[in-house]
Image (cartoon, grey):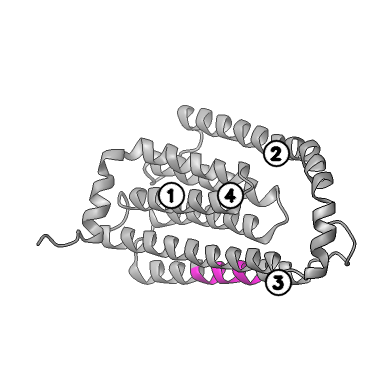
């Protein structure tokens, strides 16, 4: 009976991607974090991003350490997923007295969303598209290269840092801003580990990643608990 492939072998299966497609894929997933509003799709994009970044880590780290970075990234996504589901479940378990008012105001809210949503979502789409074009142009002209760092790794890291900052600047929600912060940190780590491969440093950075994920989860729950709740008979 054939055994299951090891994590290192699974990472080898990603070799067909190549460095350039993996870097472009990381930029694409970071862009999706800016554009998407559904936390489920955002977390999926973040998980794919961690896998692609893990493949890029194989260019500067040992394969076992690159696998560790992928596992930590997927663990962070799991923590955020459970947190977001907990908040969603709490929203569905609202006061039963509010059910009638929500039902009566449902059609009005849908009409209001039809007016507001396009205007609210077009701006992130536009600004992320322009940022992606600038990043690709700068990468093609060599403006974002960092000394002593492979050019492709340098471009991918700068792309993640830029998109992470953009994602943090376009929202006040802790979960979405937290995913932007994690993207920023992933880009910084990709750049930093290209210069420093000490195991102790990598372990310290992994601990910081997990700590940041815990803080994001706490802030997400705290934001939900402290958000104003509609009074009975008041539309949400």
Query: Which one is earlier in the sequence, the residue at label 4 or at label 1?
Result: 1
Mark 4, secondary structure of its residue:
helix
Does residue 157 belong to the magenta stretch? no
| Left or right of 118 on screen, residue 152 | left
Q: Which residue is mark 1?
A: 48
Which residues are the magenta region?
Answer: 210-218
Spatial CA distance of label 2 from label 3 is 25 Å
- Frontmost of labels 2 and 4 is 2
Residue count near mark 1 (Cα–Cα under 10 Å), binned few <14, some 14–19, many ≥20: some
Query: Which one is earlier in the sequence, the residue at label 2 or at label 1?
Result: 1
Residue count near mark 4 (Cα–Cα under 10 Å), binned few <14, some 14–19, many ≥20: many
Does residue 217 belong to the magenta stretch? yes
- Contact check, label 2 and label 1, Cβ < 8 Å: no
Query: Which one is earlier in the sequence, the residue at label 2 or at label 3?
Result: 2
Dominant SS of magenta comes to helix
Mark 2, secondary structure of its residue:
helix
Disc sitting over residue 66 in the figure: none
| Left or right of 30 on screen, residue 67 | left
Disc sitting over residue 164 in the figure: 4
Spatial CA distance of label 4 from label 1 is 15 Å
Disc sitting over residue 222 in the figure: 3
Residue 11, percent across and down?
A: 27, 53
Spatial CA distance of label 2 from label 1 is 22 Å
Mark 3, secondary structure of its residue:
helix
Residue 152 vs residue 123, the one in the foreground? 123
Is 211 placed above or below 114 here?
below
Q: Which residue is mark 2?
A: 121
State the residue at coordinates (36%, 48%). Answer: 56
Residue 18 vs residue 32, the one in the foreground? 32
- Contact check, label 3 and label 1, Cβ < 8 Å: no
């Amino acid at each position: 009976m054939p055994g299951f492939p090891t994590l290192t072998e699974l990472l080898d299966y990603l070799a067909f991607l190549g460095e350039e497609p993996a870097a472009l894929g990381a930029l694409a997933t970071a862009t999706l974090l800016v554009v998407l509003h559904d936390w489920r799709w955002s977390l999926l994009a973040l998980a794919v991003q961690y896998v692609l970044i893990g493949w890029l880590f194989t260019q500067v780290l040992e394969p076992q350490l690159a696998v560790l970075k992928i596992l930590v990234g997927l663990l962070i996504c799991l923590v955020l997923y459970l947190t977001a589901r907990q908040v969603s479940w709490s929203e569905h378990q609202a006061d039963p007295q509010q059910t009638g008012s929500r039902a009566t105001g449902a059609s009005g809210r849908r009409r209001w969303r039809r007016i507001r949503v396009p205007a609210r979502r077009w701006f992130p789409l536009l600004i992320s598209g322009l940022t992606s074009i600038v990043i690709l142009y700068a990468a093609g002209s060599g403006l974002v290269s960092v000394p002593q760092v492979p050019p492709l790794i340098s471009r991918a890291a700068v792309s993640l840092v830029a998109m992470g900052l953009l994602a943090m600047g376009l929202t006040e929600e802790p979960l979405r801003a937290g995913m932007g912060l994690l993207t920023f940190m992933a880009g910084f780590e990709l750049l930093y580990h290209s210069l420093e491969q000490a195991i102790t440093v990598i372990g310290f950075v992994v601990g910081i990643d997990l700590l940041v994920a815990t803080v994001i989860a706490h802030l997400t729950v705290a934001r939900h608990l402290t958000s104003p709740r509609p009074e009975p008979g008041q539309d949400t």
